[in-house]
Amino acid sequence: MNTDPCIVFFHTGAIPGYLRATLESARYFNPDARIFLLTNHTPSGLGRLQVEIRSLAELRNPKGDEFYRRYVHVSANKLEYERNCIGRWFYMERLLQREQAARAVYLDSDAMLFHDVRELFAVMPAGPRLFCSHAHGPAVAFIQDSLEPFLDWILAKYNDKQFLDEARLRCEKAMQAGGMVNVTDMDFIEMFINNGTGLASSYPNDLPIGHIDHCIFGAGDGMMSRPSRRHLARKRVFWRDDGRTFRPNFRTASDGSLVPALAIHFQNGAKRLIRRFNRVGEDSPLPRSLRLRYYTWLLN
């Protein structure tokens, strides 16, 4: 088993520009890590980033096939989207088995990493196999050993008639009221964390070495934010340049102190804000001072 953490992305369909940028950021801050992209597409132009492409077809496994047979759609979201969000965990487990990887960091395709994953793992306690944020969001998730117990939990829930009936009723009532109460992978993660086995745990977004952001929208993390037209607020990002690397920071709302941004989840429309902040290989011909001002304007 290889104990050096790998980095895993999952994406279906054509590879968008923002995913290429998040892959590049992961590589920039983790020059020696194995980075995997699990996809049903055949991307090109990723050779310089040394991203290892794994097709979903080659990662099929019996438990994954069983999940797709059992799946019941209880969601206002599109069937394929919701099913893939849950199904990705089965593909990830198969990848870890095949590559004999003992540890992995999973990132949503719009989650940008700005730190060495070995240092991030160092602040995670031993024991649990799956770590997600305190809000149980999987945008930046840490995996140790095996996800098998979590996958078994999901499969059992799709055999639980009472669970499914109650979930359908909640979903239908919410949709009639113009809302959404879906059965998602986040729900399964939350239930798995709370089931008392100790095999999964949440971690606080505020860590001793910085802050892991799970949604750039909202002001619930105690960071400075600005009003957003479609959301309550969007966190402000303050950039610093050490001459080699552009490093993002948040500021606390309480006293304005800088907090290193270890990862930022550019959710929903915020994907349009993603740029190639730090480039692998040849740098931008634009002056660094100009780029620093632009990044600060863009995200502040």
Image (cartoon, grey):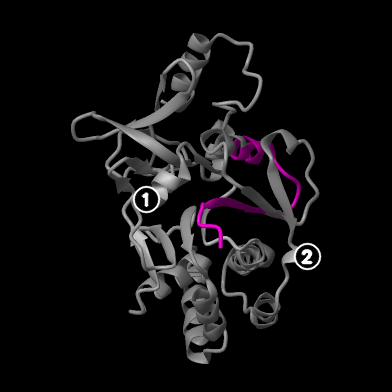
Residue found at x 57% / y 82%: 155
Residue found at x 68% / y 43%: 51
Q: Give the range drawn in magenta.
A: 1-23
Q: Residues within 10 Å of mark 1 (few under 14, many from 20)?
A: few
Residue 260, picture quadrant: top left
Residue found at x 44% / y 58%: 137
Amino acid type at circle 1 is Ala
Q: Nearer the viewer, residue 94 or 202?
A: 94
**Residue on which the image places disc 1:** 122
The reply to whether residue 203 is visible in this rendering is yes
Q: Is residue 94 left or right of residue 262?
A: right
Q: In this view, does 116 lie to the left or right of 65?
A: left
Q: Nearer the viewer, residue 52 or 55?
A: 52
**Is-magenta flag for residue 255?**
no
Q: Is residue 48 left or right of residue 169?
A: right
Amino acid type at circle 2 is Ala
**Is-magenta flag for residue 7?**
yes
101 above or below 166?
above
Say whether disc 2 or disc 1 marks the residue closer to the N-terminus.
2
The quadrant of the picture occupied by the N terminus is bottom right
Q: Which of 155 and 77 is in front in this view?
A: 155
Q: How crowded is mark 2: few (under 14 residues within 10 Å), some or many (20 or more)?
A: few
How far apart are the alpha carbons under marks 2 and 1?
Answer: 33 Å
- In percent of width and height, residue 8 lies at 59, 52
- In percent of width and height, residue 222 lies at 27, 42
Q: Residue furthest front?
A: 1
SS label for mark 1: helix
**Residue on which the image places disc 2:** 57
Q: Which of 201 and 87 is in front in this view?
A: 201
